[in-house]
Amino acid sequence: MPATTSVAPCDFVVFGGTGDLAVRKLLPALYLRDRDGQLTPETRVVAAARAGLDDAGYRDKIRGEIPRFVPADQIDDAALDRFIARLSYVEVDFAHEDGWPDLTHLLEPRPDVVRVFYLACSPQLFGPVSARLAEHGLVTEASRVVLEKPIGHDLDSAREVNDAVGAVFDEYQIFRIDHYLGKESVQNLLVTRFANTFLEPLWNNACIDHVQITVAESLGVGTRGGYYDASGALRDMVQNHLLQLLCLVAMEPPTYVDRETVRDEKLKVLQALRPMTQQDVGRLTVAGQYGPGLAEGSAVPSYQQEVEHPDSRTETFVAIKAEVQNWRWAGVPFYLRTGKRMDRRCSEIVIEFKPVPHPMFPGSDGTSEPNRLVIQLQPDEGMRLHMTAKEPGPGGIRLRPVSLNLNYEQTFQRRSPDAYERLLMDVVRGNPTLFMRRDEVEAAWAWVEPILINWAQAEHGPRRYPAGTSGPTAATTLIERDGRAWYEGSI
């Protein structure tokens, strides 16, 4: 196993330190990095919230929560004790003065360490919290601020958030996080493309028929009903996660992988997306909403029942046919699909290659399928290359689809770190490669906004689909009218 390098000493301040994101993702990720030796002895983790706790109460809370979100075989009692001892709690009113002097008193004696301010709170508070940090002199050259999605709900509001945070922090200090970019399989996509000579000559419209990007969830909205009903799948998933994955598939090779070169190339892809006209939205997009059905063997209610909003027109499913208008990708459709309460949980990128130009085995038995490269992001990170082979046996030729399978955990015999583990350490290092730059965020909103506007003005709401299925039939029609089909996991 490669050696783990410690990051610089830091004060890691989580605004919203008692919330779901902090308890479920951030603190477990920091514990695992501490267990593996990446946090220095001087590093502290400070929770800022309004939960009426003190240091002891917060430490007790997190000691009880960590085993819920970290597998038992990853718990080391001595490491957990060490991590819990790092924790502090400060009662802070994010938008008003209460508690800020206490936070200042805690941080001021250590002006030279890296300060990470993680805003795990409502986006409406990103600007006010940033302003308070400046007022109390807590922003140093070695400070970073982390912004969770959503950054705004449309282009204008995204600009307002970026302006408010940018008035306090320089762009190099702002880390807009998209946890999909921290997944090992997403990281490996760049290595697969640019460190293997056999793929890059095929990575274009001469050899690739189309690309599918699917992020499907079997669960419903759960406890996020209030947020989700004001957001929807297009804002929650497409504007950030799916478009970022599309960028990594479609981007040109950078001169080298550095802090800005990858982000420069991703921006070019967003700028090359064909804009959506009103007619395009009707033809090339599908909005859906799940109704009652069966999910994971149990009867589940409709979305409207779950959020207790019987007239809700919020979409829980989106399918889009997109085009990247440049030399490499002209004529290659990108099919994007995401939804809740679907028949399986998976996140994957499918690169489907064009069929062979001439059938050389006309008298053969069996079937052949298109060559596909399937990059699995979850639940099991890995990669499969689907090919056609001859089935062993005497006599004639019998064709059979087979796959070359790379499972990261089995191949490398080690646990794949959670995306937040990688991304949080990159924040401390000051490495923004895997984070969204302001111009990326705004370019993504500019492309998505015409879809939002046209859906809001449409006479009919999203198309219904039963929970536990693959989505509305209109999404199947969207791809089948091009003579293609959604990839559903078969070889």
Image (tube, grey):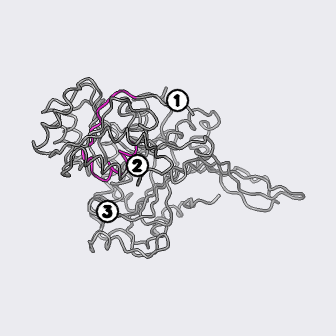
Q: Is residue 15 magenta?
A: yes
Marks 1 and 2 sit apart, C-alpha to C-alpha, by 31 Å
Quadrant of residue 163 in the image? top left
Q: Earlier in the sequence, mark 1 or mark 2?
A: 1
Q: Is residue 455 left or right of residue 362?
A: left
Quadrant of residue 78 in the image? top left
Q: In the rendered image, is residue 484 in sight?
A: no
Report which residue position mark 3 lands on. Answer: 223
Which numbered mark, 3 or 1, is in the foreground of this view? 1
Which numbered mark, 3 or 2, is in the foreground of this view? 3
Q: Is residue 233 magenta?
A: no
Q: Which region shows up in magenta?
A: 7-29
Quadrant of residue 229 in the image? bottom left
Classify 10 Å Cα crowding around label 3: few (below 14), some (14-19), many (20 and above): few
Judge whether 427 appears above or below 402 on screen. Answer: above
Residue 324 percent across, percent down from the top left: 46, 45
The quadrant of the rendering that contains the C terminus is bottom right
Residue nearer the viewer, 198 or 290: 290
Cβ atoms under marks 3 and 2 closer than 8 Å: no
Q: Earlier in the sequence, mark 3 or mark 1?
A: 1
Q: Which mark is residue 3?
A: 1
Q: Is residue 210 left or right of residue 361?
A: left
> SS of the residue at dot 1?
loop
Residue 259 percent across, percent down from the top left: 40, 29
The quadrant of the rendering that contains the N terminus is top right
Q: Which mark is residue 241?
A: 2
Residue nearer the viewer, 376 or 71: 71
Q: As shown in the figure, which amino acid type bears the numbered disc 3?
A: Thr
